[in-house]
């Protein structure tokens, strides 16, 4: 009886150790937990707009978790959850072919292209400050500009807790969490 109990304990310890090793050291498990879909579209848009593909992937993960057809409660559409008015502005400014809301909602390549163009425009507006650009992607560039000009936030990751909007604060933290995960898991994106 005592021997059977000892064998069960050893088996349990062995199984727990194996699971811990798989969980902590396994690239395949991490890749399974943090997948990236639409890599070719992300690479193409990142290259076209001089953006890091990891950042685009992180925004997609935070916005829609790679599920096409999504529409937020506020009306944002597609993988990158672009507001229709913003998407129409991007299409006009970038000179893209006409994009209606249904295409933006369901076509990953279009959502990524429009979202990447917009993210690049935010990078330009905020002097290549990726943290401020990501905050602006969520809260709008006008809000972020006000925070920076009023000294409420300095645009840095170290002071992200100073962002006045809780949703944006958490959004920026989440995007950069995914960004760092993707950089570690997919160094040759």
Image (cartoon, rainbow, N blue to C red):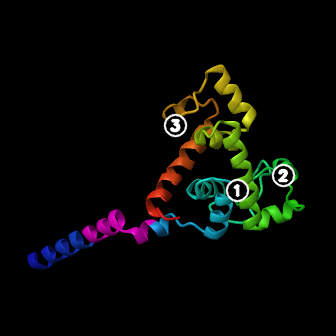
Residue toward you, 67 or 73: 67
- Report how far apart the C-alphas of labels 1 and 3 lie in the structure: 22 Å
Q: Residue 84's mark?
A: 2
Where is residue 187 drawn, in percent x and y? 46, 62
Q: Secondary structure at mark 1?
A: loop
Using the image, determine if residue 128 lies above or below residue 179.
above
Q: Quadrant of the N terminus?
A: bottom left
- Which of marks 3 and 1 precedes in the sequence? 1
Q: How many marks?
A: 3
- Report how far apart the C-alphas of labels 2 and 1 lie in the structure: 12 Å
Q: Secondary structure at mark 3?
A: helix
- Would you say the residues marked 3 and 2 are in contact, meaning their CB atoms lie under 8 Å apart? no
| Left or right of residue 132: residue 7 | left
Q: What is the crowding at mark 2: few (fewer than 14 residues within 10 Å), some, or many (at least 20)?
A: some
Residue at image coords 88%, 62%: 97
Q: Which residue is mark 3?
A: 157
Q: Which residue is mark 1?
A: 80
Using the image, determine if residue 156 lies above or below residue 108.
above
Using the image, determine if residue 167 lies above or below residue 5.
above
Closer to us: mark 3 or mark 2?
Answer: 3
Was residue 155 drawn as part of the magenta stretch in this picture? no
Was residue 22 drawn as part of the magenta stretch in this picture? yes
Residue 60 occupies which quadrant of the picture? bottom right
Residue 138 visible here: no
Q: What is the crowding at mark 1: few (fewer than 14 residues within 10 Å), some, or many (at least 20)?
A: many
Residue at image coords 33%, 69%: 22
For the magenta stretch, what is the residue range? 16-30
Where is residue 176 drawn, in percent x and y? 53, 47
Residue toward you, 121 or 67: 121
């Amino acid at each position: 009886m005592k021997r059977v109990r000892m064998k069960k304990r050893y088996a349990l310890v062995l199984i727990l150790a194996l699971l811990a090793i798989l969980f902590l050291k396994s690239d395949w498990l991490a890749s399974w937990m943090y997948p990236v879909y639409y890599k070719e579209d992300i690479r193409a848009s990142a290259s076209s707009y001089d953006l890091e593909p990891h950042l685009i992937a992180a925004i997609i993960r935070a916005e829609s978790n790679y599920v096409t057809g999504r529409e937020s409660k506020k009306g944002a559409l597609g993988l990158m959850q672009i507001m229709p008015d913003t998407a129409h502005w991007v299409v006009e400014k970038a000179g893209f072919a006409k994009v209606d809301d249904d295409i933006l909602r369901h076509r990953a390549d279009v959502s990524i292209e429009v979202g990447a163009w917009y993210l690049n425009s935010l990078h330009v507006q905020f002097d290549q400050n990726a943290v401020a650009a990501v905050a602006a992607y969520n809260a709008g560039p006008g809000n972020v500009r006000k925070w920076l000009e009023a000294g409420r936030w300095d645009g840095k990751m170290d002071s992200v807790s100073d962002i006045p909007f809780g949703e944006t604060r958490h959004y920026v933290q989440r995007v950069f969490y995914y960004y760092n995960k993707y950089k570690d898991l997919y160094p040759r994106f």
